[in-house]
Image: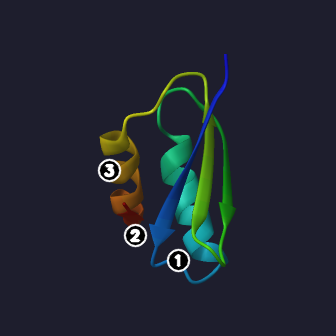
Amino acid sequence: MSVTATFTVSGMTCGHCVSSVTEELTELAGVTDVSVVLDSGAVTVTSDRELGQDEVKAAVTEAGYQLVG
């Protein structure tokens, strides 16, 4: 079973930002794919389990950005 969730991340301005967020989210257990749209800050995460808001927020914070909402 695949679960897809979309989050909004603020503070990303360039490709390096995208790489940092992608890297941190990919390290979460069960994550199989991360897709980032830099212009809107939309981050779509595909995983084999439902991700908790807190763990996603922690990963985004670790990368140096903020989860919106």
Please give the residue where the numbered disc 3 appears in the rendered image: 58
Which SS class for mark 2? loop
Instruction: Tell me which amino acid carries mark 3.
Output: Ala
Instruction: Tell me which amino acid carries mark 1.
Output: Met
Other residues around mark 3 within 10 Å, as few (<14) / some (14–19) / many (≥20): some
Please give the residue where the numbered disc 2 appears in the rendered image: 65
Tell me if label 3 and label 1 are in contact, CB under 8 Å.
no
Which SS class for mark 1? loop
- Give the x, y percent position of residue 22: 58, 55
At x 34% / y 61%, what residue is drawn?
Answer: 61
Alpha carbons under labels 2 and 1: distance apart: 7 Å
Residue 46 vertical placement versus 41 (above, below):
above
Tell me if label 2 and label 1 are in contact, CB under 8 Å.
yes
- Give the x, y percent position of residue 58: 32, 50
Please give the residue where the numbered disc 1 appears in the rendered image: 12
Other residues around mark 2 within 10 Å, as few (<14) / some (14–19) / many (≥20): some
Residue 5 vertical placement versus 1 (above, below):
below
In this figure, which colouring scheme has been used for the structure? rainbow
At x 41% / y 58%, what residue is drawn?
Answer: 60
Instruction: Tell me which amino acid carries mark 2.
Output: Tyr
Residue furthest toward the top? 1
Alpha carbons under labels 2 and 3: distance apart: 10 Å
Q: Quadrant of residue 10?
A: bottom left
Q: Earlier in the sequence, mark 2 or mark 1?
A: 1
Q: Is residue 17 left or right of residue 51?
A: right
- Say which quadrant the N terminus sits in: top right
| Residue nearer the viewer, 10 or 20 | 10
| Residue nearer the viewer, 43 or 65 | 43
- Say which quadrant the C terminus sits in: bottom left
- Give the x, y percent position of residue 67: 39, 62
Q: Earlier in the sequence, mark 3 or mark 1?
A: 1
